[in-house]
Amino acid sequence: MKAYLVFSGSGPIVILTSHPSVEHPVLLEKLTAKGIEKFIAYEIPVETARSRYGPHFDVVTGDLHETDDLRVLDYNGQRAFRLFTFGEIGDPIMHEPAGRQT
């Protein structure tokens, strides 16, 4: 499992995924279905996320199945941004759809 702090046009969220990368094609499809096409993501150590969210982390992952490859741990962007220091998150992963013109 991996955890990511994802910044999109609607603000930060924290997600959990069974995919090896936030840029895995299947995960990108699921994020797109949620309206997230362009984003900057930072990997969070799973144990750090678990310690910050406590029992809520266990509730979100409690009924996780092998086929469940995306869970939103936190929709509250202000809280998500506040819970992690810059030193705790990985390098930025910037993603935007191919062929996008500005």
Image (cartoon, rainbow, N blue to C red):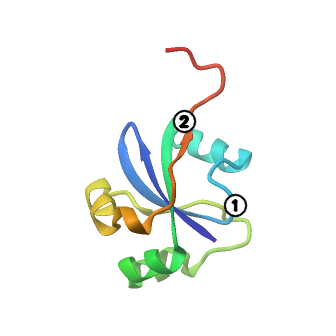
* Disc 2 target residue: 37
Residue 67 image offset from top left, x and y in percent: 73, 65
Q: Is residue 35 visible?
A: no
Mark 1 — residue? 19
- The three-letter code of the residue at mark 1 reads His
Identity of the residue drawn at 48% across and 82% down? 58
Q: Is residue 66 above or below residue 34?
A: below
Q: Badge 2: how crowded within 10 Å, few (<14), some, or many (20+)? A: some
| 41 relative position to 51: left or right | right
Label 2 sits on what residue type? Glu
**Mark 1 residue element:** loop
- Asked if the residue under mark 2 is in contact with the one under mark 1, i.e. CB atoms within 8 Å, the reply is no
Question: Looking at the image, is 31 positioned above or below residue 5?
Answer: above
Residue 58: mark in rendering: none
Q: Out of 35 and 51, give the one closest to the viewer.
A: 51
Distance CA(mark 1)–CA(mark 2): 17 Å
Q: Point out the tag, 1 or 2, that comes first from the N-terminus.
A: 1
Tell me residue 42's x, y (percent): 49, 56
Instruction: Determine the residue positioned at 54% across, 35% down.
Output: 37
> What's the residue at 38%, 77% (across, down)?
53
Alpha-carbon neighbours of circle 1 within 10 Å: few (<14), some, or many (≥20)? some
